Amino acid sequence: MADPLIIKICGIKTPEILETAIDAGADMVGFMHFSRSPRHVTIEEIATLISEARGRIQTCVVLVNPDNSCVAEVAALGPDWIQLHGPETPHRVEAIRAEAGVEIMKALPIGTAEDVAHVADFVDVADGILLDAKPPKGADRPGGLGETFDWSLLKALDPSIPFMLSGGLTPQTVADAVRSIRPYGVDVSSGVESAPGVKDKRLVEAFIRNARAAQ
Ligand SMILES: O=C(O)c1ccccc1NCC(=O)[C@H](O)[C@H](O)COP(=O)(O)O
């Protein structure tokens, strides 16, 4: 039997939505630490959320091009994962993995065939790969924009590279994504919100239910 699909709900800000994600059967939650994000949470808030989640669901702190002191501060909170969602090079990802001592998810923007070819550069330096839509020019942040990318570009991806699929997924589209793209996991933020940064309990539950049913 195939491994169970990993379902990640990203941009969680409150203990209430954390409980919703756990109760509905998510596998991983993401906490954004990036001041320009509508989902930004402080180090103190992340510490509280991680301690409530520990042993119940995997936790992932999302950072954008962090410096070493930020990596050390976040790693000290004991998340299962740190997600790097900026322009970090393979060399920098490798250095952060060594410094943090936690698993590293590297998010990569996909907009062209060249972007797909670039994915292989990160396979040996990260513990997981998350493919997201490339942000439009002028966007004020590199993720969480509710943008989908052209999934047909992934036909050129080396099939031996496992990845999580992200970018504009919703409760309505996740089943088709799971069946047609066959990622090992799916990640969502905007698609389960009623407004930027405001998660909707029913949408979170529907996303998890529909993703599971599609397996
Ligand atoms: O969510 C954000 O605001 C964000 C800001 C800066 C970097 C990354 C960010 N989100 C990271 C994620 O993993 C999102 O879940 C992913 O980009 C998909 O978002 P969406 O298209 O809104 O589902």
Image (spheres, rainbow, N blue to C red):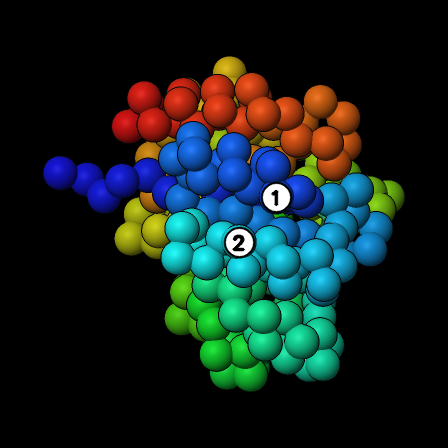
| On screen, residue 204 above or below 118 | above
Secondary structure beneath dot 1 equals helix
> Quick one: label 1, few (<14), some, or many (20+) residues within 10 Å?
some
Image quarter hosting the C terminus: top left
Q: Quadrant of ligand 1?
A: top right
Q: Position of residue 56 (x, y in %)?
A: 40, 51
Q: Which residue is mark 2?
A: 52
Q: Which residue is mark 1?
A: 15
Asked if the residues shown at circle 1 and circle 2 are in contact, with their CB atoms under 8 angstroms apart, the answer is yes
Q: Amino acid at mark 1?
A: Pro
Q: Is residue 83 above or below residue 173?
A: below
**Quarter that holds the N terminus:** top left
Query: Which residue occupies 64% across, 25% down?
Result: 200
| C-alpha span from label 1 to label 2 | 8 Å
Query: Which residue is rendered at x = 72% and y = 31% of the image?
Result: 198
In front: 57, or 105?
57
> Given the current orientation, which residue lies at the most extreme left position?
1
For the residue carrying disc 2, how many other residues have a C-alpha within 10 Å: few (<14), some (14-19), or many (20+)? some
Q: Is residue 8 visible?
A: yes
**What amino acid is found at the position of numbered circle 2 in the picture?**
Glu
Percent position (x, y) of residue 58?
44, 54
